[in-house]
Image (spheres, grey):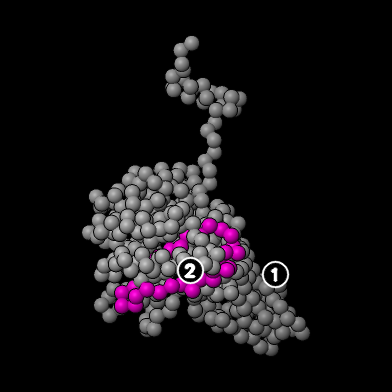
Amino acid sequence: MPAKSPLRHLLVCTALAALAGCRPDPLPPLDQQLYIWQRQWRPDHAQALAESRADFSTLRVLALQAQPKVGWSRALVDLPQLKADGRPVIAVVRLDGQLPALDLQVAQTQIARLLADWQAAGMTPFGLEIDHDSGNARLPGYTAFLLSLREQLPPGVKLSITALPAWLDSPHLPALLQAVDSSVLQVHAVSDPRRGLFDPVQAKQWAERWSRISNKPFYLALPAYGVALLPDSGGAPVVESEAPLDRIGVRRELLADPQQLADLSRQLRQQPPAHLAGLIWFRLPLPGDRRAWSLTTLNAVARGDTLASHWQVERSGQAGHYDISLVNVGNLDLPLPARVELSTGACEGADGLNGYRLQQSSQHLVFNRQSSARVAAGGRRVLGWARCQGIDQGAWNVYP
């Protein structure tokens, strides 16, 4: 009996899909991983790790860095806490792109000491990631550095690198990728910051191009944070990230849009580029991190949940003395609204707090925003107080 042609088999499967079970198997979900980038761990890490465990398979932890004029320094990682978390860990070594040269001997010594100290503490990393923003002209030297470094790693430790889209135009990229087990393509904060922190269309294009060059697994590093731009005397912007800068000037805040990232994640799940192994989110947020998504929002985006949130106004107190709060209900962080209006009875006194100024009439309290901020999903912010005969719990309006 002659074999069926592929076309005939496809037509049969299409016609009888529901009965014959010819539907293709569903695509597996993309792996989700998480960067931990704090240089000094805090007690808050314990709760953040616990709340992230269900949604992120692997932790990539800043462990060691080399900077011009500063030299080598280690992040103060809580190794017992990291061990107790139980997830696979990849130690990240940050080599500043402004270093005049990569000293292989010194780097090997520093990395060997790091891995030995971690292992002595019972924490053996699954892999090592080198984060180095090399210029294209220096890629051959960087490749030689990685090949030598890989030979010195303990057995079983995988080597990966953070990679830049600018390398896509280099003829040396294929050799570089052959020197490592996997790569992490960074698609955020890679161009002029005045053009924005992230472009989802461009990110997808870069991923598609990368998949045609790399025959090894690669990941996309995606942003879950924001930065501020400050003007410099020369006209170029200065970027303020986690640590505040001692500079005067109006700050222009840039924040990665959770909905944009959720849409891109969904597209990548539906049509993943070849060899794309997963997504890595930068970075694990801690309470008080003013330039990062809340962990609630980050978890929701990673899971592919529908993002939705809105404000609720709540009052608390007794004997006519009320604290008035905004509560962010849902899974999406929100900027403070411009105006909040409440219907009240006669009030003896009232005032705005936390960046709100009060306008008062005989039957209304109007709180007007004077400064910008964000409230995390599930968070609350007291916007004022009032001593009134009554506040109508259901008669309020919030204006973006």
Q: Nearer the viewer, mark 1 or mark 2?
A: 2
As drawn, 278 above or below 332: above
Say which residue label 2 marks.
117
Residue 224 is left or right of residue 167, and the answer is right
C-alpha gap between disc 1 and disc 2: 59 Å
| Closer to us: 256 or 373 | 256
* Residue marked by disc 1: 394
Q: Which residues are magenta?
A: 67-94
> In front: 300, or 79?
79
Look at 54% across and 78% down and name the residue there: 368
Residue 149: x and y in percent read: 35, 59
Crowd band around label 1 with a 10 angstrom C-alpha radius: few (<14), some (14–19), many (20+): few
Amino acid type at circle 1 is Gly
Residue 112 lies within the magenta run: no
Taking the image as drawn, is residue 352 in sight?
A: yes
Residue occupying image coordinates x 60% and y 57%: 54
Write the residue at 66% across / 88% down: 349
